[in-house]
């Protein structure tokens, strides 16, 4: 899968970096709330709230509805400025310069549609997902987050909506991408991209 990423540097620097600086949504430490009663030394009888696990780099993704259980590689952009692809066609790939799954914004995980011999790759059945289906992502901190499919769309590869898929957002999203359409042997590329838009299910 080869996602045309014209203008990706502008997106990453101007879009994602602006979100990081203004909102601190990546790895910036979050101040811990003072435990109830700590200021007075008086012990109170209310249970202590457990803060959600901080987002970390993804390790695996599973999508039960289409029998996906894949390791997640980390990729950036290739020499042409496109999002790179996983080295192993049975794996998925997280776009490392972007958002972490579980952080506010559009995290992106992509996968191959098929292999060089034409056999199915990790995201071969991605277009078969429907709203309500679930994707689960485990991370380096041991957390497992569930994302629910909101919608599934197909885009011409030359008209890919970069900002909608990779850019800032007010919600915690995970967008899954693979190739679709027809194969262009000369360009060694598929004509379309399938994007599954998902949103975090709160714990």
Image (tube, rainbow, N blue to C red):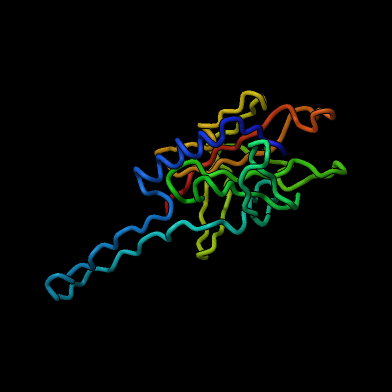
Q: Position of residue 84 (x, y in %)?
A: 67, 43
Quick one: 187 or 9, which is closer to the camera? 9
Q: Quadrant of the N terminus?
A: top right
Q: Residue at x 62, y 23 (%)?
A: 159
Extreme-left residue of the structure: 40
- Write down the quadrant of residue 19 in the picture: top left
Q: Quadrant of the C terminus?
A: bottom left
Q: Is residue 132 left or right of residue 110?
A: left
- Write down the quadrant of residue 15 in the picture: top left
Extreme-front residue of the structure: 79
Q: Residue at x 51, y 55 (%)?
A: 145
Numbered disc total:
0
Q: Position of residue 29 (x, y in %)?
A: 36, 58
Q: Position of residue 23 (x, y in %)?
A: 35, 45
Q: Position of residue 67 (x, y in %)?
A: 70, 50
Q: Is residue 29 above or below residue 175?
A: below
Q: Residue at x 60, y 41 (%)?
A: 176
Q: Is residue 21 above or below residue 47?
A: above
Q: Is residue 84 left or right of residue 104?
A: right
Quick one: 17 or 191, which is closer to the camera? 17
């Amino acid at each position: 899968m080869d996602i045309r990423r014209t203008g990706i540097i502008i997106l990453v620097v101007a879009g994602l970096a602006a979100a990081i600086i203004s909102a601190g949504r990546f790895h910036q430490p979050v101040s811990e709330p003072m435990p109830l009663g700590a200021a007075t030394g008086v012990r109170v009888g209310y249970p202590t709230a457990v803060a959600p696990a901080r987002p970390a780099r993804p390790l695996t993704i599973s999508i039960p509805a289409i029998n996906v259980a894949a390791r997640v590689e980390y990729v950036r952009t290739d020499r042409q400025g496109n999002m790179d692809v996983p080295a192993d066609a049975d794996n998925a790939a997280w776009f490392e310069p972007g958002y972490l799954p579980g952080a506010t914004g559009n995290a992106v995980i992509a996968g191959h549609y098929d292999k060089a011999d034409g056999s199915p790759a990790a995201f071969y059945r991605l277009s078969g997902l429907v709203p309500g289906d679930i994707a689960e992502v485990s991370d380096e901190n041991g957390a497992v987050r569930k994302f629910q499919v909101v919608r599934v769309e197909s885009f011409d590869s030359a008209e890919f909506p970069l900002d909608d898929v990779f850019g800032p957002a007010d919600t915690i999203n995970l967008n899954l991408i693979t190739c679709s359409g027809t194969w262009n042997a000369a360009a060694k590329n598929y004509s379309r991209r399938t994007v599954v838009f998902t949103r975090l299910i709160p714990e």
